Amino acid sequence: MKAKLSGVGPSDASKELTPDEAAEILNVSTAFVIGLLDAAEIPSFGVGAARRISLEEVLAYRERDRIRRREALRALTEEAEALGLGYGLLA
């Protein structure tokens, strides 16, 4: 049974998550999260043979990724407008 983690609050910031729980929060696969951990995009630590991730780190990654995607969209929009393609997506 999967844990419901959509409504996390400030008091949960020190919570330790499994890769499955982190994947649920990020809305990605567990394999993708493992790749992020292996690439040190999200810090993790071991608990016995298992990996754990702090909720704070998962939320920080989600925010960094949101900003990165927004900046990429803005750059693509500016390039399209410069080429006269008429993409006025962002105000």
Image (cartoon, helix red, strand yellow):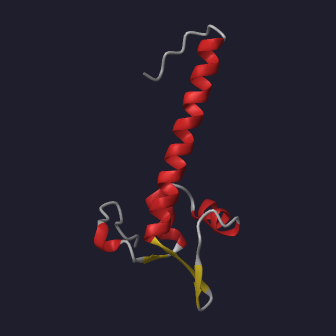
User: As drawn, is 62 to the left or to the right of 83?
Assistant: left
Q: Nearer the viewer, residue 40 or 2?
A: 40
Q: Quadrant of the N terminus?
A: bottom left
Q: Is residue 24 visible?
A: no
> How many marks do you count on the picture?
0
Tell me if residue 48 comes above or below residue 67 in the rendering: below
**Residue furthest toward the bottom?**
48
Q: Quadrant of residue 74?
A: top right
Above or below: residue 18 compared with residue 48: above
**Would residue 66 be seen by someone viewing this image from the given angle?**
yes
Residue 20 location in percent, x, y?
51, 69
* Residue 32: x %, y % from top left: 62, 59
Residue at 67% in and 63% down = 35
Look at 59% across and 66% down and name the residue there: 42
List x then y, in percent, for residue 29. 57, 59
Q: Is residue 37 above or below residue 82?
A: below
Q: Is residue 60 left or right of residue 82?
A: left
Quadrant into which the C terminus falls: top left
Query: What's the residue at 52%, 52% (across, down)?
Result: 64
Judge by depth and name the residue closer to the eye, 47 or 42.
Answer: 42
Q: In percent of the image, x 49 and y 16: which residue is there?
A: 88
Residue furthest toward the right?
A: 39
